[in-house]
Amino acid sequence: MASEAPAGGGGGTEVRMSQLVLPCHTNHRGQLGVGQLLQWIDAAACLSAERHAGCPCVTASMDDIYFEHTISVGQVVNIKAKVNRAFNSSMEVGIQVSHEDLCSGQQWSMCKAYATFVAQGHANAKVKLKPLTPQTEEEKIEHSIAAERRRMRLAHKDTLKDLLTRSPRETELETRDGSMAVPAEKTRVESVELVLPPHANHQGNTFGGQIMAWMENVATIAASRLCHAHPTLTAIEMFHFRGPSQVGDRLVLKAIVNNAFKNSMEVGVCAEAYGQEMSTSRRHINSAFMTFVVLDEEGRPRTLPMVVPEPEDGERRYREASARKKIRLDRKYIVSCRQTEVPLSVPWDQSNKVYLSYNNVSALKTLVAKANWVLAREKEKVRMYTLEEDKFLSFRIEMTVCIPAAQAFSLLSDLQRRHEWDSHYASAELVQQVDDDDVIYHVVSQTLSHENKPQDFVILASRRKPCDKGDPYVVAFRSVTLPTHLPSPGFTRGETLCSGFCIWSESEEMSKVAYYNQATPGYLNYVTTNIVGLSSNFYATFVACEKFLLKNKDDLILRLQDL
């Protein structure tokens, strides 16, 4: 059963679905089959997408899904789906799944997912979507971060390719005491399904959730053949649908265990479609990678047998599975954690650069979207706001400056020039130009620590231009750890969790510049001193910032006139 919220804003696309888990939905243990859950998730998300688009929609991709619990027969599954953001012809739908026990009234969170849907008009033509206007704080946060998640999806293949390029080409088999090696070939599964009308939408395209359910089925069989037990699916990696299949198609589903780690295994699954004629060439519909564990009677993961990969392609899949495991851990550790659970300084390397950049920008965007900012001080045109929540005291300082937003963005994102206006900065050394949008600096502060030594920081600066009209320019800062710049005796290593600039264009010549900082203990004294009016340090710093922007704007105009 599904219900829809009234139209208007992000909440206007909300769809709620509740399903009673019956015996026909469960496996041999009386637990809800993940394939059935994926069908319900896809159906709810599709209804939400179509509510916004006003036309049929198809599943384009699904991000990582981590299953936190199993659901038993007789319990109720509650699914909430809502469009977070609409791009040109695609949209991101956020899905939250929980389950409840009707007898005790207890509820548990099951998983959270993000799906991308594409709107299709007549003859499968793409439809330009109307923008979505978020209303609540939660909707504003999800809307803002959706652009970062989209960026991360697009970079996923390159991340895997980079990691494999730096990894050894030789396949090294793990040694495991008391474990027999199983040839990967023995886990291979191939099955065919005929797409019937109940498996498809009103346009005759196969439901994405139905394809996912069939893929989960063959993946479970492949995993069982390795461990000779009933495995539990714990995660599905981000995947993309490469093309549609229709009623009457035959879907060939292939699965094989790519690699078995000590307590988990990765199963690769491929779906191909062909028509009624056997001579028809097969179309690659989708590939997915699923992680399984085998639990003992006490619910602890068992040690798994090793896998011996097939030559060539099998060895490639074996290496890729190891790389994907590292990427999954990075994504789960850096991206899926709540901001308060991420350590201040995360080790930076090539394999996690995309996820650290995502975390850096999304943390700042989340802070910007908070609703409970309170005006603490105002002096002339400089305003200081504070936000108190949990363990953090955050502050925001903003002013309006007569400079185009793009110019302010360019000037404020260069930390090597910050000492020109910020008296707290002594120097900033460019350590690494990661890419066009991300730079790592070693910053030395003028501020002395309680040890009477200057502070230094290793800072990741992430820049983002506006994704849509009304979006700000963003420059986000966070601490990272580099093996080349470890703490030294001459400095006290400082850390910043979340800080940066947002710059909104108010006209061709005017910009609103706002600086945000989620204050860590080293910053608290400076913040509270300014809040209570014992110092005008923040005001002097921002006035200097305005002068810096105006001076360099004029210098740029003079240089252009000289040309």
Image (tube, rainbow, N blue to C red):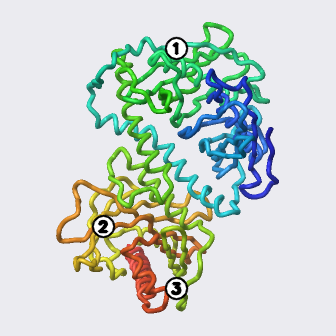
Q: Amino acid at mark 2?
A: Phe
Disc 3 from disc 1: Cα separation: 66 Å
Residue for badge 1:
189
Q: Residue at x 66, y 40 (%)?
A: 118
Q: Quadrant of residue 316?
A: top left
In what element is the residue under mark 3? strand
In what element is the residue under mark 1? strand
Q: Is residue 143 left or right of residue 296?
A: right
Q: Which mark is residue 457?
A: 2
Mark 3 or mark 2: which comes first in sequence? 3
Residue 34 visible (yes or no): yes
In the image, residue 276 sits, relative to residue 440, either above or below, namely above
Percent position (x, y) of residue 253? Answer: 57, 18
In what element is the residue under mark 2? strand
Q: Amino acid at mark 1?
A: Val
Q: Is residue 278 left or right of residue 165?
A: right
Q: Dot 2, how many residues are within 10 Å of its Cα: few (below 14), some (14-19), or many (20+)?
A: many
Percent position (x, y) of residue 206? Answer: 70, 26
For the N terminus, the image quarter is top right
In this rendered view, identify the residue nearer to me: 469 or 228.
228
Q: Which mark is residue 40?
A: none
In this rendered view, identify the residue nearer to me: 408 or 307.
307
Q: Which mark is residue 382?
A: 3
Percent position (x, y) of residue 399? Answer: 53, 81
Q: In this rendering, which labeled residue sits more in front, label 3 or label 1?
A: 1
Mark 3 or mark 1: which comes first in sequence? 1
Q: Residue at x 38, y 47 (%)?
A: 352
Q: In this rendering, which labeled residue sits more in front, label 3 or label 2?
A: 2
Q: Residue at x 36, y 80 (%)?
A: 422
Q: Dot 3, how many residues are within 10 Å of its Cα: few (below 14), some (14-19), or many (20+)?
A: some
Q: Quadrant of residue 9?
A: bottom right
Percent position (x, y) of residue 309? Answer: 36, 18
